[in-house]
Structure formats: structure tokens, C-alpha cells
Image (cartoon, rainbow, N blue to C red):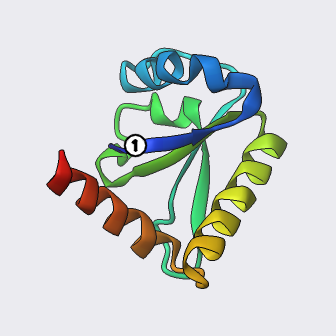
């Protein structure tokens, strides 16, 4: 699982986002937390995955590129929409995956 360096977090969990990330990485249970990832399907822009699914031993976590987390499915959907709009406002396009992968590559080169 790869986490975007400056991943998004909903307002209600913004101060706890690093603790939530730690719990997800250590397979600790969390109620009503959703992870927003780059889509596994070329037909979609983002996927919204409940964190409890990531606790399953054989869930294909290695393929996930996390760009956001939020509490509650409705909030996660709103955050996903905000992420897409941020990408569109920045690039004038909806190539969300390309945008985040390029930004991640650039930050790796600088860091």
C-alpha cells in the first residue's frame, strides 16, 4: 500500500489522520473509516474502500495508492469529489491517476 505524501483527510478526522493511517497499516479495527484510493479500474477515477476490508489477510493491499481518508461513507464520497475537482482545477483534466502518480514521482525526486 502506497500513501500519497500529502493525502487528503476529512475535516472531522484531520487532526487524527496520522493515527488513522498507522492503524490501517497495522490492521487495527476502525469503525466507519473509509480509504480513498486511485481506482483499480480504468473506467473509474477513485475507489472508496471501508477500512475493515483492508484488515482481511488476503485483500490485495499492495496495489492500493491511497490519496485520502474520511469518516463515514457520505463524507468519503464528498471528499472524493473534492479531490477530483482539485485535480481538474489544477490541470483542466480529469486524469486523476496520472496527476497523483506524477506528483508522487516528483516528490520522490526532490526528497
Of 76 and 28, nearer the camera is 76
Q: Nearer the viewer, residue 77 or 52?
A: 77
User: Horizontal and vertical percent for residue 61?
Assistant: 36, 44
Q: Which of 76 and 59 lies nearest the eye of the viewer? A: 76
Q: Residue at x 59, y 80 (%)?
A: 94
Q: Quadrant of residue 75?
A: top right
Across and down, in percent, residue 31 comes to 68, 20
Q: Is residue 10 shown above or below 46?
A: above
Q: How many marks?
A: 1
67 is higher (above) or lower (below) than 55? below
Please tell me which residue lies in front, 10 or 110.
Answer: 110
For residue 105, which quarter of the picture? bottom left
Give the quarter of the figure containing the N terminus: top left
Q: Where does the C terminus fall, quadrant-wise?
A: top left
Question: Left or right of 34: which side holds 25?
Answer: left
Q: Looking at the picture, how far across and down is residue 63, in whole percent? A: 32, 55
x then y, percent, for residue 88: 63, 75
Relative to 101, is 73 on the left or the right?
A: right
Secondary structure beneath disc 1? loop
Asked if residue 56 lies left or right of residue 8, the reply is left
Residue farthest toward the right in the current orientation of the protein? 74
Question: In the rendered image, which residue does mark 1 sit on?
Answer: 59
Q: Is residue 87 above or below residue 82?
A: below
Residue at 49%, 15% (x, y): give it. Answer: 19
Badge 1 local density, few (<14 within 10 Å), some, or many (20+)? few
Residue drawn at x 44%, y 32% as measured from the top left: 56
Amino acid at each position: 500500500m502506497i500513501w500519497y505524501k500529502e493525502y487528503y483527510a476529512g475535516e472531522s478526522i484531520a487532526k487524527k489522520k496520522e493515527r488513522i493511517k498507522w492503524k490501517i497499516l497495522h490492521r487495527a479495527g476502525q469503525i466507519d473509516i473509509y480509504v480513498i484510493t486511485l481506482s483499480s479500474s480504468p473506467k473509474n477515477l477513485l475507489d472508496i474502500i471501508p477500512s475493515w476490508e483492508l484488515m482481511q489477510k488476503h485483500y490485495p493491499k499492495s496495489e492500493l495508492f491511497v490519496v485520502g481518508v474520511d469518516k463515514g461513507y457520505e463524507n468519503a464520497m464528498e471528499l472524493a469529489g473534492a479531490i477530483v475537482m482539485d485535480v481538474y482545477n489544477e490541470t483542466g483534466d480529469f486524469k486523476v491517476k496520472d496527476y497523483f502518480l506524477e506528483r508522487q514521482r516528483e516528490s520522490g525526486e526532490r526528497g
